[in-house]
Amino acid sequence: MITFTPKKITEQLLSVVQDRVRDVLEKRYGLNKQAQTQTLESIGRTYSITRERVRQIENYGIQSIQKSSIYPEYEPVFKELQKAIERLGGGVIAEEILLNELTDDPETKDHIFFLLVVGDPFYRSKENQSYAHRWYTEKTIADMVEKALRNIYSSIDQDELITEEQLIDRFRNELIDLTDKHDEKILKRWLLMSKDIASNPLGEWGHASSPNVRVKGIRDYAYLVVKRHGSPMHFREVAEEIQRLFNRKAHTATTHNELIKDERFVLVGRGLYALTEWGYSAGVVKDVLRDILEQHGPLGREEVIAKVRKERYVKDNTIMVNLQDPAIFRRLNDGTYTLVD
């Protein structure tokens, strides 16, 4: 992916600074034999100086390299990295994605990162609550992409899930001026800059904070299973599908108990669960009958059965047996059923 050897370049650039400055930079960026980055505090303890003094030495070292006589010799290296950012990310890309695309070797990633820091053609935006660390070559493009990501996040309800295709379509609409110039791979890499939007194990996208995306336990896996199925499922089927789709052991009894306790599910038949978001109401058959008659007024036998069957997977006879409770329902002279006053 790159035509130069990052470690050799950093060694040559570091040769222009004093020994202590070089040691600080090597420790700070993991460029020494240990290949481990160190904090300002830990480096300060080594030299018995403050973290602020370490930061000053670090900044001085980088500026010294940039002002050195050998720095211009490596302009082709920085140009190559600049083109990589533009090729892989259209001018802006998450740091982790960029480094992973350029190399699989952790040590080499440290050296490339140092070259990005020292290089003049690119800029780094630090990680914050909404975005990962990212590098860009054109601020205008970076700002447009971040604005589009914010708008997409706002367009998705808290617990809503959308397909990747739907998400890409929304992204294209937000970035009409840019999307004609870039393929879907770059759009997907831009999505990965966001910490507000993420995908779940089934590849569906939504708010990263939603339990439908940040799947933690049996309840969340069960929700994805039933939603994917699209119609009520028996709790045994749910447990089996969790095992099949996610390779996660789900005991039947445990699954049943979790479904009972989660408001996202509603019992609609013997062991059958549907999603509350589908419009099913909670409660036993009598509760459903009460709600229906309260909402619609007196109804005939067939009307009652039809409306209950939209809420519950029960036999007609079960519905009629529940209607015989004289404390709650009564049959009028015209054959319709209503609530007791």
Image: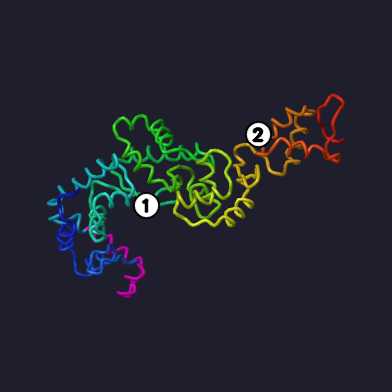
Q: Position of residue 16 (x, y in %)?
A: 16, 62
Rendered-image quadrant of the C terminus: top right
Which residue has dot 2 on it? 310
Location of residue 210 in the rendering, given as x and y in whole percent from the top left corner: 52, 48
Where does the magenta region start and end? 40-63
Q: Secondary structure at mark 1?
A: loop
Residue beneath the point at 38% across and 42% down: 191
Q: Of the residues under marks 2 and 1, which one precedes in the sequence?
A: 1
* Mark 2 residue type: Lys
Label 2: state its secondary structure: loop
Q: Residues within 10 Å of mark 2 (few under 14, many from 20)?
A: few
The answer to which of 52 and 203 lies nearer the viewer is 203
Q: Residue at x 18, y 56 (%)?
A: 6
SS majority, magenta? helix
Q: Which residue matches tag 1?
A: 126
User: Of residues 337 and 44, which is closer to you in this image?
Assistant: 337
Magenta includes 55? Answer: yes
| Image quadrant in which you'd find residue 158 | top right
- How far across and how far down the image is residue 69, in percent? 13, 55
Residue 265 figure quarter: top right
The residues bearing labels 2 and 1 have C-alpha atoms spaced at a distance of 52 Å
Q: Is residue 231 above or below residue 214?
A: above
